[in-house]
């Protein structure tokens, strides 16, 4: 780095070349005026040169908003359509209005913490508070954008790393009971058989809302009693989009007899409607469609609202459609199904995810396992089939025990000879 010093009246003007602005491609300089002796001015100039060489000086005049826009354009290519829509919304609603005009060179961790507190108190629609989890997501977007700015050379440090975003409390999973699920399914069967089929399949498989909406008849193998789950339907910036599953992996899930009967009835209903309109239902038609030919999927939010309406009619409060997944997981774990099988059915990437989400249910199972082992150990003599009184042994049992005692004595003798104690 080059530094320059020159006399300007009764002061010294210092100037250091900082390189080219990575955003505007203009040459950048750091300037300072020192009203003191030349020796002090030279010392300050040396400090400025050192800061420039270590990358601690201002690198660009760009704002936070300019970085967010450039980062979003760069990163959105790898996002799912739903993530694109949600990220764009957080940037427009929560980040640009508060931090968009701030120069990156002036951005500090304290500024971000102050912004997070403001979002928690009045960052929502109508100045309502935002939940800690939502603020945490906004922090994640900003941290990723600033991290990319660091890699691009726009900033020397990422101030978001030193912030203290709000802690997100562990969610209290509210799993509906079997009776509650049964009531909702019966209500759905009376008012909307198609929705009842959707809910039955969701409760039977534990699949995500988007995955059930994306099912096609070609995915269902009635003879082998399985369903292939390989895609999902989500709401993107421009409407509904079909994509792969959340974990980018397909899976095949077994179906029970009741689910098969409901699916078969639903198929007959769809074929009958298509025939009435002189349409042949294609093999790959959607199982749940707003069109007679099965070409248009249901809107995910509409399904959730219909489920909420059913719950209200049954007097159930605080139960979401997503809670059917919790219902499946907790019922299977409580029934003793191993975690790996439950994880595969839910479509978790690995069993660790299932362990993290449903740890408290596994603790209950662990307590039950401890009680089982306690009973087994206490009943060991009787469980082994041997009577407490040796006189009650048969000749064959007595001979078997005698042989084992002889073998044990031989092992003991060999051990004593080895240690020199014999």
Image (tube, rainbow, N blue to C red):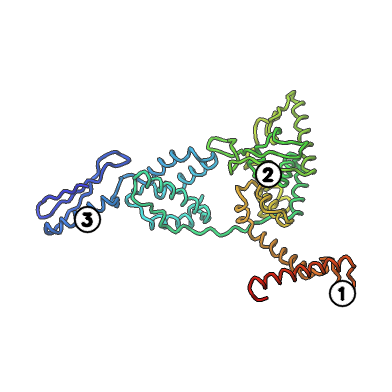
In front of the other: label 3 or label 2? 3
Crowding near the residue tagged with mark 2, few <14, some 14–19, many ≥20 C-alpha atoms within 10 Å? some
Residue drawn at 11 percent across, 57 percent down: 38
Q: Is residue 143 visible?
A: yes
Report whether 148 appears left or right of 307: left
Q: Residue furthest top?
A: 278
- Give residue 330's position: percent from left, percent from top: 69, 55
Reading the image, the residue beneath label 2 is: 306
Percent coordinates x, y for residue 297 in the rendering: 65, 35
| Real-space Cα separation, disc 3 to disc 2, in angstroms | 66 Å
Which residue carries the number 3 mark? 47
Indicate which label's residue lies in the foreground, 1 or 3: 1
Query: Do the residues bearing badges 3 and 2 touch, measured as CB atoms within 8 Å?
Result: no
Are the residues at dot 1 and dot 2 in contact (C-beta closer than 8 Å)? no
- Residue 397 lies, in percent from the top left, at 86, 66
| Left/right of residue 332 with respect to residue 22 in the rendered view | right
Q: Is residue 316 visible?
A: no
Query: How far apart are labels 1 and 2 at the CA level?
Result: 68 Å
**Residue 389 numbered tag:** 1
Most extreme residue toward the left is 9
Q: Is residue 409 above or below residue 30?
A: below
Q: Disc 1 versus disc 3: distance between alpha carbons? A: 93 Å
Kindly identify the residue that appears in the image at 66 percent across and 54 percent down: 318
């Amino acid at each position: 780095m080059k530094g320059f010093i020159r006399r300007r009246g009764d002061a010294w003007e210092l100037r250091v070349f900082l390189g080219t602005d990575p955003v505007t491609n203009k040459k950048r300089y750091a300037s300072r005026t020192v009203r003191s002796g030349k020796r002090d001015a030279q010392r300050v100039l040396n400090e400025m040169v050192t800061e420039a060489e270590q990358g601690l000086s201002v690198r660009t005049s760009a704002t936070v908003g300019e970085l967010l826009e450039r980062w979003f354009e760069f990163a959105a290519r790898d996002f799912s359509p739903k993530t694109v829509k949600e990220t764009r919304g957080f940037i427009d609603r929560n980040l640009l209005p508060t931090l968009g005009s701030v120069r990156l060179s002036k951005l500090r961790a304290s500024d971000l913490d102050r912004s997070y507190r403001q979002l928690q108190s009045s960052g929502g629609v109508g100045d309502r508070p935002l939940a800690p989890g939502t603020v945490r997501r906004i922090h994640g977007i900003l941290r990723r954008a600033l991290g990319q700015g660091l890699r691009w050379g726009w900033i020397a440090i990422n101030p978001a790393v030193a912030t203290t975003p709000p802690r997100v409390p562990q969610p209290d999973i509210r799993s509906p009971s079997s009776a509650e699920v049964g009531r909702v399914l019966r209500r759905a069967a009376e008012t909307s058989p198609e929705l009842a089929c959707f809910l039955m399949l969701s409760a039977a498989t534990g699949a995500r809302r988007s995955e059930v909406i994306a099912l096609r008849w070609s995915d269902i193998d009635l003879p082998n009693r399985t369903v292939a789950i390989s895609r999902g339907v989500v709401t993107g910036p421009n409407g509904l989009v079909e994509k792969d599953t959340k974990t980018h992996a397909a899976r095949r899930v077994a179906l029970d007899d009741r689910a098969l009967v409901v699916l078969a009835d639903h198929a007959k209903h769809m074929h009958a409607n298509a025939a009435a309109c002189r349409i042949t239902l294609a093999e790959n038609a959607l199982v749940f469609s707003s069109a007679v030919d099965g070409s248009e999927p249901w809107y995910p939010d509409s399904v959730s609202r219909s489920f909420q309406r059913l719950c209200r009619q049954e007097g159930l409060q605080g139960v979401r459609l997503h809670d059917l997944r919790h219902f499946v997981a907790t019922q299977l774990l409580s029934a003793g199904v191993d975690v790996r099988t439950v994880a595969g059915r839910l479509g978790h990437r690995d069993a660790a995810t299932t362990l993290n989400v449903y740890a408290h249910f596994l603790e209950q199972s662990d307590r039950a396992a401890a009680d089982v082992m306690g009973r087994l150990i206490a009943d060991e003599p009787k469980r082994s089939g041997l009577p407490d009184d040796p006189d009650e042994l048969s000749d064959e049992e007595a001979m078997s025990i005698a042989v084992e005692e002889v073998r044990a004595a031989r092992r003991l003798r060999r051990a004593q000879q080895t240690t020199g104690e014999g």
